[in-house]
Amino acid sequence: MTIVSPPAAIPIRSIKWTLKQPHQVNRSGWTGRRQVSTLPGGSWWSCSAELRPMIGMAAAQPWIGFFNGLKGQVNLFPVIAVEAAQHGGANPTVVLGAAGARTLTLSATPPALPQGAMMTVKLVDGTYQLVVLTAPIAGTTASFAPALRADATTGAGSVETILPFAHVALTEDSFTHSVDPGQKYTLAFQAEEAF
């Protein structure tokens, strides 16, 4: 499993992100009481995207080559999770973050990100995890969902807040593109977070 970099920023026309948070819910047939079981770190993101139409074979070929070079579900690629930079300046650094946690302690001057903003956290196992803020950053504390799958790394490069991303893999073993009259190429993909 290799992380393959796209030839340029992926020209996404539209994208739909879904956070899968599996739980088991049991309800008593006698009392109606509900019990929920959850597994911290058992969540993952999926996305369905359509690229902007490309006119001409020369414009489409690098992308056809890239997506077919992923070898179906084998290799990973980064997908940026926001439309534009969330803030100027530098990324903060993680001071403290543990597996199963839904909060991180960031460096002394984190950016003022609102509820709903996204971050990518580098984990000690070398993978990255996309999270969404469940509250505005307060002081040096970032609260988010889903819970971390592993401990967060600390120091430089430990969190991306400017252009957060997810490392994803295609959900199918094949990649299809279509060509309409006038050499109008249409490409789309479905992928899910891979770690």
Image (cartoon, rainbow, N blue to C red):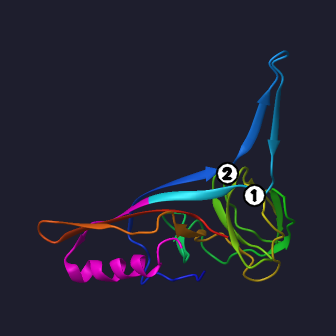
The residue shown at (28%, 77%) is 60
x and y percentages locating residue 170 in the rendered image: 50, 67
The residue shown at (56%, 75%) is 76
Q: In which quarter of the view is residue 29 placed?
A: top right
Q: Is residue 12 left or right of residue 118?
A: left
Q: Amino acid at mark 1?
A: Ile
Residue holding disc 1: 137
Could you tell me if residue 139 is visible in this image? Answer: no
Mark closer to the chain start, 1 or 2: 2
| Quadrant in which the N terminus is drawn | bottom right
Q: In which quarter of the view is residue 155 placed?
A: bottom right
As helix, strand or loop, the secondary structure at mark 2 comes to: loop
x and y percentages locating residue 22 in the rendered image: 70, 47
Residue 53, above or below 74: above
Q: Which residues are magenta?
A: 49-73
x and y percentages locating residue 192 in the rendered image: 56, 62
Across the whole image, how many numbered discs are drawn on residues? 2
Q: Amino acid at mark 2?
A: Gln
Residue holding disc 2: 115
| Quadrant in which the C terminus is drawn | bottom right
Query: Between 141 and 195, which is closer to the camera in this rendering?
Result: 195
**In magenta stretch: residue 50:** yes
